[in-house]
Image (cartoon, helix red, strand yellow):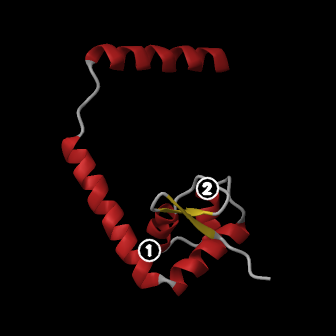
Amino acid sequence: MAKEYIERREDVFYVAGSRVSLDSLVYLFQEGASPETIREEFDSLTLEQVYGAIAFYLAHQSEVDAYVAEQRRRWSEMEKTATLPSPELREKLARARHDLGAKRR
């Protein structure tokens, strides 16, 4: 029985059963990272999932490459139209990070 390693949710490819996007793995793989190195970057994944995702990519390379290019284009558009949070919100976030760090110590 074949196991599915990739699932599509709302037009985004993910490693099945995870919140890790396929394009995150593809970027590292295209940069020459080994499956073991990729696994270290995503400790919520098993090595089997990483190999499965890479196998999916290799079997559907033209489709996934087009998808990744579209995701990059969308991200670029979002960056162009994004607005920075207000100084008040940035201060609240900084205080929350500080308080969270203090609690962890």
Q: Residue at x 44, y 74 (%)?
A: 30
Of label 1 and label 2, which has the lower sequence position? 1
89 lies left or right of 5: left
Give the percent coordinates (x, y) of residue 100. Answer: 58, 19
Q: Quadrant of residue 11?
A: bottom left
Q: Is residue 105 visible?
A: no
On screen, residue 3 above or below 70 = below
Q: Residue at x 50, y 72 (%)?
A: 29
Residue under label 2: 42
Q: Quadrant of the C terminus?
A: top right
Query: Nearest the camera: 22 or 36?
Result: 22
23 lies left or right of 19: left
On screen, residue 57 above or below 10 = below
Residue type at mark 2: give it.
Phe
Residue under label 1: 30
Query: Nearest the camera: 76 or 6?
Result: 6
Query: Nearest the camera: 14 or 93?
Result: 14
Residue with the most extreme left position:
80
Residue with the most extreme front position:
10
Real-space Cα separation, disc 1 to disc 2, in angstroms: 16 Å
Give the percent coordinates (x, y) of residue 93. Answer: 42, 20
Query: Nearest the camera: 97 or 5?
Result: 5
Labelled pair 1, 2 in contact (Cβ < 8 Å): no
Q: Quadrant of the N terminus?
A: bottom right
Q: Residue at x 20, y 42 (%)?
A: 81
Q: Which SS class for mark 2?
A: loop
Residue type at mark 1: give it.
Gln
Give the percent coordinates (x, y) of residue 58. Answer: 52, 84
Q: Which SS class for mark 1?
A: helix
Q: Quadrant of residue 104?
A: top right
How many other residues sit within 10 Å of disc 1, few (<14), some (14-19) or many (≥20)?
Answer: few
Q: Is residue 16 visible?
A: yes
